[in-house]
Amino acid sequence: MFVAKTINAYQEYYENTFKSGQIGFVPTMGFLHDGHISLVRESVKNNDFTVVSIFVNPKQFGQNEDLAAYPKDFNRDRERLETEGVDLLFFPDEVEIYPEKNQLSIHILPEFTNILCGRFRDSHFEGVALVVLKLFNIIRPDNAYFGQKDYQQFQLIQTMIDEFNLAIKLHAMPIIREKSGLAMSSRNSYLSPSDKLLAANIYKGLLHIEEQVMANNLSLKDVSLEYTNYLKLKSDKMKMQYIEVYDRRLKPLSQLETGNMFMGTAVFIGNVRLIDNILF
């Protein structure tokens, strides 16, 4: 596996090795878990070459978020990717991606940023869109793989591909969960063993809401109160930030649409913020 730390090094490798084959791309921020590896395996299986990037993007973190503390283990990540058959690891530093003050930015309409995580993470999705667009232009993939856990992010990237006429096929891969049901996340490393068990109730609560909605025991307008009460019964340590229901394109629902619904939530356990969602 070749490790490219600069854009020039990647471009040279691309011209010499990748140019004639189909490229799959998995962008990550590192500290890889089995969820990331499921994306890598899908890419390796379905492409001639697979590229993985590790870059902790400062532009998608807010002032009081965990940029400085975000977990890292480059050597472990490199070994895992090499074992999985990845052809190239793109590992740039911040100066390589943002060499000087940006003169251009990406503006996202409020109808997208004023829902779900966008309501609470100012300029987060502008930062996501900017770095992904830059990475797409650098890597020049045919296929890109994203996890469903960051569902709002996936929908944003799909919209960007459509509206900017990018010749990339986007693939959403299912959430990989721990045995308890907790969605795998690099931020799970912040949790104590007891808090990890507690965090499994985030997903169990979503399943409870789904069951109640589908049995016509709960209206869409009462979802937030029911979910809050569910979490409180488990522990006062869990604080819901939001729970919202949309169709699968993240458009408002006027009524139940079985098979076309998305429900997403963000929950704090102490100062650790975790997200999860289900489709139903």
Image (cartoon, grey):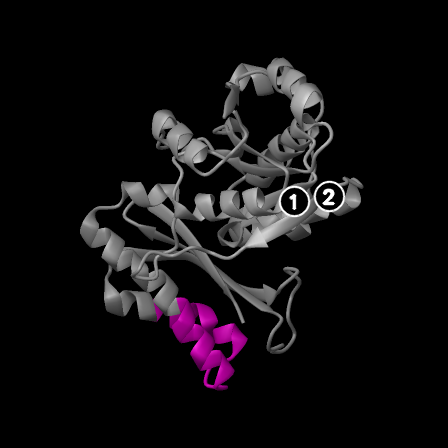
The residue at 47%/29% (across/down) is: 56
Q: Nearer the viewer, residue 247 or 186?
A: 186
| Residue 161 disc label | 2
- The answer to which quarter of the image holds residue 208 is bottom left
Q: Is residue 159 visible?
A: yes
Q: Which residue is mark 1?
A: 157
Neighbourhood count class around disc 2 (C-alpha, 10 Å): few under 14, some 14–19, many 20 upward = some
Predominant SS along the magenta part: helix
Q: Amino acid at mark 2?
A: Ile
Q: Nearer the viewer, residue 128 or 36?
A: 36
The residue at 20%/50% (across/down) is: 193
- Image coordinates of residue 280 in percent, x first then y, are 54, 72
**What is the C-alpha distance between the residues marked 1 and 2?**
6 Å
Q: Which residues are magenta?
A: 206-229
> Is label 1 in a helix, a strand or a loop?
helix
Q: Nearer the viewer, residue 23 or 31?
A: 23
Neighbourhood count class around disc 1 (C-alpha, 10 Å): few under 14, some 14–19, many 20 upward = some
Looking at the image, residue 220 lies above or below residue 187: below
